[in-house]
Image: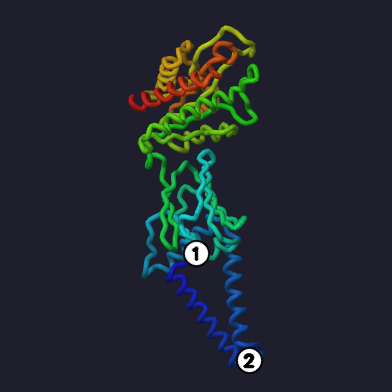
Amino acid sequence: MEEKVLKRTGIFLSLISVLICGSIFRFPQIRSVSQLWVEAMNEYELKTQAEQLNMTGLELLDYNNEQAKEQAKEEPITFDSQLRLELPLGVSGDELQITQDYVTQTIDIKIPYADSEYFYRYPMLGRSDNIDSLTYESREGYGVVEFVTSQVLELETSFDKDYFYIDFLTPHEVYDKVVVIDAGHGGNAPGATKQGVNEKDIDLDIVLKLKELFDASGDDKSIGVYYTRTEDLNPSFENRVGLANKSGADLFISVHNNSTQSGKMSSINGTQVMYDELKGDEALGSKGLAQICLEEVTAQTGSSNKGLVEGNSIYIIRSSEVPVALIEVGFMTNQTELNNLKSEEYQKKVAQGIYNAILRAFAEGY
């Protein structure tokens, strides 16, 4: 708590002391000074805590800011970051654990030895811009502060012996370019299934190989890459396209595989890419990105070029606020193509084609 806030509390308690002393002078036989002092302290603390417990996390943050502002007229409170947490006694800033789920824009901060009263005894201060909700709970020896933000944000943190500071940065404040990669289906949504092979697994295998290419590029600041999934999960359509929109991505690419309408094995094969035809004439738009993806993937794999496909009927395509391309790498209903898609070497070629397409798109001005 800031020094001025402590001073204010001290003045308040001094007034209580005067009242108590007056009461003692008039009614010396009622109770001892120590009893009245403890009762006054408890009443003040319970009242303050009750007021705070009736607030949401964001309301409590705003309340803390207003209290600090009122008490800082002569000596303004200054700290550089958007949020400041006070560290519990004996806890260092490097002991805090931070996890982020970019798909749901959820940030958890675990604070060792922070009990259920931590959030009220150690007021958090700062701005609440871009925070939709703020909650706190104590579990298993940790206090957990959880933020849900209105957009994808990166954290920049620092600390001193008393406080932990958090800056929220947009992806474009960290990276020159931003791309979102979506591995189609997942979890309880297998996609096309042929001969015991699930589309969701091929989609994910290709994306993980693409991730290896980006991870090995050694350029951490040029292109920021966000993935809707890197495990066998099934994010909602809203969260998939939301990751692209809320990160302000420059490109959104979704990886899928195809099948015939009947689902029967056939001779039909090749690569198609879907785009938003309602935005097809935009310069550096969905259609142009789809064409780049089609050319680069077929160049790497030797797959047949089956052209572009209108895709505004697909939720993640029509809902995307950024240039989007949905790549149908191959037909799982074609035996040769299915064999290729199961091959690690072929998956690497597909990943390389998508990687090349992203670099080319950025080189061409996306």
**Observer able to see residue 276:** no
Q: Residue at x 56, y 89 (%)?
A: 22
* Quadrant of res 112: bottom right
Q: Is residue 55 above or below residue 297?
A: below
Horizontal placement of 351 versus 267: left or right? left
Q: Are marks 1 and 2 in contact (CB under 8 Å)?
A: no
- Local SS, label 2: loop
Horizontal placement of 116 versus 107: left or right? right
Query: Front-most of 171 and 40?
Result: 171
Check the image and tell me how it is coloured. rainbow
From the image, tell me which residue sits under label 1: 90
* Residue 347 at x, y percent in the picture: 50, 21
Q: Nearer the viewer, mark 1 or mark 2?
A: 1
Query: Front-most of 201 and 62?
Result: 201
Tag 1: amino acid:
Gly
From the image, tell me which residue sits under label 2: 27
Q: Is residue 162 above or below residue 81?
A: below
Q: Is residue 99 above or below residue 332?
A: below
Mark 1 or mark 2: which comes first in sequence? 2
Question: Dot 2, how many residues are within 10 Å of its Cα: few (below 14), some (14-19), or many (20+)?
Answer: few
Query: Front-most of 346 and 151?
Result: 346
Tag 2: amino acid:
Phe
* Residue 12 at x, y percent in the picture: 51, 77
